Amino acid sequence: MSYEMIAILMFATMMLMLLTGQRVFAAIGFVSAAAAALLYGTGAIEMPFNAAFKLFNWYPLLTLPLFVYMGYILSESGIADDLYKMFHVWFGGLSGGLAVGTIGLMVIISAMNGLSVAGMAIGATIALPEMLKRGYDKVMITGVIQAGSSLGILVPPSVVLVLYGMIARQPVSQLWLAGALPGLMMASLFVIYIVVRCKINPDLGPTVSEEERNIPFSEKMKLLRAGIIPFLIFFFMTGLFVMGITSLVESSAVGATAATIAAAAKKRLTKVVLEETVRKTLGISCMFLWIILAALSFGAVFDGIGAVRAIESLFITRWDLSPWEVLIMMQLSYIFMGMFLDDTAMLVIVAPLYVPLVIALGFDPVWYGVLYTITCQIAYMTPPFGYNLFLMRAMAPPEITLPDIYRSIIPFVLVMTLGLILVILFPQIALWLPNLVYPSRLG
């Protein structure tokens, strides 16, 4: 059997196992272990062993549990609730203001957690009932929460970009900086769409009643102080990092410590909150460690049989595609896979194949990491099986049906596609900040 056929068989077997509902790390790990044993015999045991040591020697991986912990301590202690109350009062007078405030909430939750699931959970449990109660259109606000929560994998500290950096061997600090401006641009495009849509049809997002908005200015300032804590933690953490005072890992430790101190200062650091935070942090961190370990093992076998070079030869030599045509094909493949898989599974499957190809074509792998992440956002919300669609259905109240959820994401997918095109046409949207902080990149 040729190496090309072995590569296709490995890929097809892994996809089949994932589609049957197997855990991502189990499916990928099994295929890589079985292929290694069949190809290399007893010596194949060294592959996962070496992958494990490579994983645990990667110092920036310490940021993963620290950032996840920071997000959960702020969420479990109710500080995220304070943030939404602040948006509720300060933006309630604007038509569609609560939807705009929800996007702001999602950006901050993303900057605290780095996962889309956290934003979805907080949006569906806090923001969605409030907006439904105030007469907001259920289809529009369902789309708002799904689109806003997807920012969690783009805005730093994105856990997806940490995984991409690990698998693609790119600096996480540069990837985070590259994701910052596109993430804010995407959030701004969402806000512009909401404001324009509610301006045309005010019934979609009515203003909050005068009684609720007419609270004393001192009470408004109190809410502002309570809701601004996450902002302060985020800017304190990233500011020290950008100024070069702390390293990447140290800045994650600063964020986790500051979040714990904030919860304690508000007398919310109870035993229950701490136990729940630690339990969820451990679960998420262990899941990602197993996935990365499986990905490294799979990548070692795939690279060993020359699959990467075979794909490069197929696209460039046999099909005679231009670099931009190859790039578009790769992005379309992400959208297709996103109908069935989550971002982590997609990354593990194709990053070992695509990243060397991206570099060979002359594209910046840091810029491509942002393209991959934005495409994942779009794929998350693409029917029929987009990951976010079913997550939303599980968390939404009964009056929001699956057809409502499908209809809700159409305009936001179009807005995100516009954002993707802008980053492709103007790479400096992603690369300006990393080039500014790391001038050596330009040399």
Image (cartoon, rainbow, N blue to C red):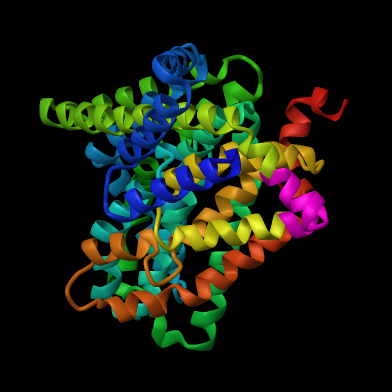
Compared with 4, 426 (above or below) is below
Whole-percent x, y for residue 386 in the image = 40, 63
Quarter of the picture holding the N terminus:
top right
Q: Which residue range is magenta in the image?
A: 311-326
Whole-percent x, y for residue 279 in the image = 19, 29
Residue 426 appears in the figure:
no
Q: Nearer the viewer, residue 398 or 283?
A: 283
The residue at the point 49 percent across, 81 percent down is 198
Of all residues, the one furthest to the right in this rendering is 443
The residue at the point 37 percent across, 44 percent down is 227
Q: Nearer the viewer, residue 67 or 240?
A: 67
Q: Is residue 376 left or right of residue 311?
A: left
Q: Tell me if residue 106 is in the magenta stretch.
A: no
Quarter of the picture holding the C terminus:
top right
In the picture, residue 331 is in which quadrant? bottom right
The residue at the point 51 percent across, 16 percent down is 58
Q: What main secondary structure does the magenta stretch of the protein show?
A: helix
In the picture, residue 47 is in which quadrant? top left
Of all residues, the one furthest to the front in this rendering is 1
Q: Tell me if residue 316 is in the magenta stretch.
A: yes
The residue at the point 55 percent across, 45 percent down is 5
Q: Is residue 217 left or right of residue 375?
A: left
Q: Nearer the viewer, residue 141 or 58?
A: 58
